[in-house]
Image (cartoon, rainbow, N blue to C red):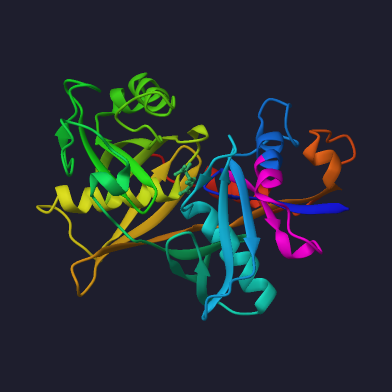
Amino acid sequence: MVVKMIKVHGSGNDFYLLDQTQFPEPLTDAELKQLAINSCKRDGAGLFEGADGVLVVDKSAHPGALGRMRVINADGTEASMCGNGLRTVARYLGTQNSTDAFRVQTMYADLKVQAVPDFATHVPAFSVEISPVSFDAQTLGMHANHDAATIINETIPALSDTLKFSAVAVPNPHLIAFVDHETLMGPELGRIGQWMNDGKNEIFPDGVNVSFVEVLGQNSIFVRTFERGVGFTNACGTAMSASSLMYVLLHQDSTDFNQEIHVTNPGGMVKTVVHQGADEEYWMELIGNATFVKIVTLPVAEALAADFSQASVTVTGEQTAYEDFVAALPTA
Ligand SMILES: N[C@@H](CCC[C@H](N)C(=O)O)C(=O)O
């Protein structure tokens, strides 16, 4: 049996997109985990250049949802949500079903997605809903500051004497600190990210995505993320959405809800809009590229055995257009 996967990315956060409906019987969870671990390895050990994870697309039984997305991190763990990945899944399902606006089932919510004007020639873009939002320590799997119920712009002395963190689930867990440029680029993010995702620490035993955010100007931020189950990434869509939420909540003197925020990251840029609904709940729009880099086919049994020698590839040409788009972005 042959598997076809599409190499995709949003802001350079890259994935193999696997449509389970191509098989007579879907791959089992154990097979999906093995496929992700094998394919995502970097430095020539995985499938081509590897990836940050595998996006598993399947049918949805939910009325109104065109399909279902599951997210398997590079280390084989499953995440509840992936903002950059959802844009590419939205493009995939939208093209298949010839529609521009619909919902996609994810672990905790059926999220609204919509095609938007291309960011540049051959750089298609989508807007996706990021929700539900929670600050609750239990939802976050967080045990910090003597089991505080929430952490919003506070130090966590066990982590750092100086950095102020906010912990927010969107719904995957994020720890966010606003920092200066030196700290953004310095070693603290790696230290804290690795520690909080070592599977042994008592603060986030199930891990957490850690982001440092620099405010570049009004409604303009830069986000660098150490991802749970991945490590340093070019970009994390849910992290950029959670960071935008905290930017709005903590900078009410200079910004507000419903304003477009320009979010730069090591892999490119996205736009976000933070909303507050009628019941006071927060949700975000995440708007960015949904790039299909290449189509890869290989025998399933060999992929599961980490043998990629028979993989064949068809390049789409979109990556060159994306790189031109990024090269033309104004520098901060
Ligand atoms: N890159 C994703 C988030 C993927 C999940 C994350 N690693 C987790 O375990 O929560 C995004 O774009 O949101």
Tell whether position 17 is magenta: yes
What residue is drawn where x is 79% and y is 54%?
A: 4
Q: Quadrant of residue 91?
A: bottom right
**Residue 211 shown in magenta:** no
The image shows residue 275 at horizontal and vertical percentages of: 26, 65
Q: Position of residue 205 (x, y in %)?
A: 37, 32
Closer to the camera, 153 or 323? 153
**Front-most of 214 and 44?**
44
Rendering coords of residue 133 (x, y %): 30, 57
Q: Is residue 20 left or right of residue 182?
A: right
Q: Is residue 247 above or below residue 303?
A: below
- In the picture provided, is 308 more to the left or to the right than 97? right
The reply to whether residue 34 is in sight is yes
Question: Can residue 116 be seen at all in this image of the molecule?
Answer: no
- What segment carries the magenta color? 14-33
Residue 13, position as x, y percentages in the image: 54, 44
Q: Nearer the viewer, residue 291 or 48?
A: 48
Q: Is residue 300 left or right of residue 121?
A: right
Q: Residue at x 26, y 42 (%)?
A: 167
